Each structure stands twice: as C-alpha cells, then as structure tokens.
Amino acid sequence: MKCVVVFVLAFTMLTGLAEADEAPSLLFSGGIQSLIWNRDNFYIDYSDQVTDGCLPQPARMKDSIELVLRQNGFSISSEDSIFKNKIFITALGYGTGTGACLITVNAKLLFMAHVSVPFSKNLKDESHTFITVPYEFGDVILSGNKSSMQRRVETSIKGFGEKLYLDISRSKDEISEKFPDILQHYNSQSEN
C-alpha cells in the first residue's frame, strides 16, 4: 500500500514538473534589473556632507556622472519631479586633522513603479499605487590625502556612471532576448 501511495505522489509531482512552463519569468528571472532597462533620461542631484575642505568642489560630482551618461547616449533633465528617474549621489566625510580625509560616496537611482496593493484596510481590492524604487549602483569609502580627494571622488563617480550604463544596457539585452514582445511594445508606444 505504501508503495502505491509513493508511486502516485511521485507520478503526480513529476507530471506537474513536466508540464511546467519553461518560459522565463520577468519578475523572477530579471530581478530589479528588469525594472531599469528602459531608463534613459535622468535628473541628477547630490548631497554634500563633507567637511574640513575635503571636497572643495562638490558640484563636480554631478558633472562627473552627467558627462559619462551623456557620452553613453542618455539624456539629462534639468527639472526634478516625482516621476523622473533621479540619480542621487551622497558624499559624507571629514578631515582627520593630519592632512588626510575619509569620505564615503554612494550613488543610487530612484524611480517610480506602478504596483498593486495586495491588502489594505483603507483601499478597495485591486487598488494600485506608485512606489519609489531605489537601485544602488555605487558605493565606496575613500581615505587619503586631502589634496587628491576631489579627484578620487570624481573618478569613483565616473566609475559609478559606467556601471549604471552597463547595468541598463545588459538589462535591455536580456529583455530583448528573453521577452522580445515587451521591447517591441515599448518601442511602438515610444513612436506614438
């Protein structure tokens, strides 16, 4: 009797696996990268929390990433709004008193996503809302001479911009390969 039960269970499980759809799933195959593939226009902002003269020209952080993004075909918006793709760079640091500095730099992309609300006491079933999705693409801690810190921060931020470009390009390639209908639909909507 036990053999029959085990055989029936095994057959049921194997049959279910054999019938499973082999198509890739955007949500599970792509991760957060599946949400960045069509980002191509950005507003750039920064927060300078560096003291003691360790970052004398903080606006050059914005210039550094903007240059890389423009060189790779992305456009930059001069106006911020809640629905813009926003790149936010944060620099936090201080001087050590011996002519050296310690700075941490973080870069993230913030964008809006339209999502369904699964459970809510205040909203009706099947409601939707917008959420801000953070995508961190750069983080570094730098220490060294105050005289070279500005250059090192800018170099790190340029590297962050190159990484963002690669992440978006690779994501677009993956969407094109695994989900060509999505890319075709997006392109047809862009033309209208």
Image (spheres, rainbow, N blue to C red):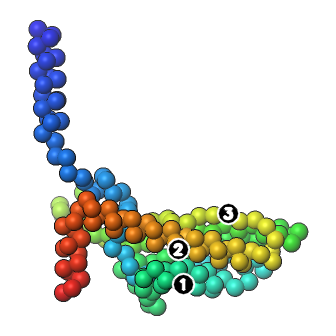
Residue at the image position 88 percent from the left and 69 percent from the top = 98
Which of pointers 3 and 1 indicates the residue nearer the eye? 1
Q: Can you tell which mark lies on residue 141? A: 3
Kindly report the distance in space between the C-alpha atoms of the residues bearing marks 2 and 3: 17 Å
Q: Which residue is mark 2?
A: 161
Disc with the residue nearer the chain's start (2 vs 3)? 3
> What residue type is disc 3 on?
Ile
- At x 52% / y 74%, what residue is drawn? 161
Q: Is residue 31 above or below residue 157?
A: above
Pointer 2 local density, CA inside 10 Å: few below 14, some 14–19, many at least 20:
many
Q: Is residue 166 left or right of residue 60?
A: left
* Figure quadrant of residue 31: bottom left
In the rendering, which numbered label is found on residue 67?
1
Per the model, the C-alpha gap separating discs 2 and 1 is 9 Å
Q: Nearer the viewer, residue 128 or 10?
A: 10
Q: Is residue 161 above or below residue 140?
A: below
Using the image, tell me which numbered label, if any, was put on residue 109. Answer: none
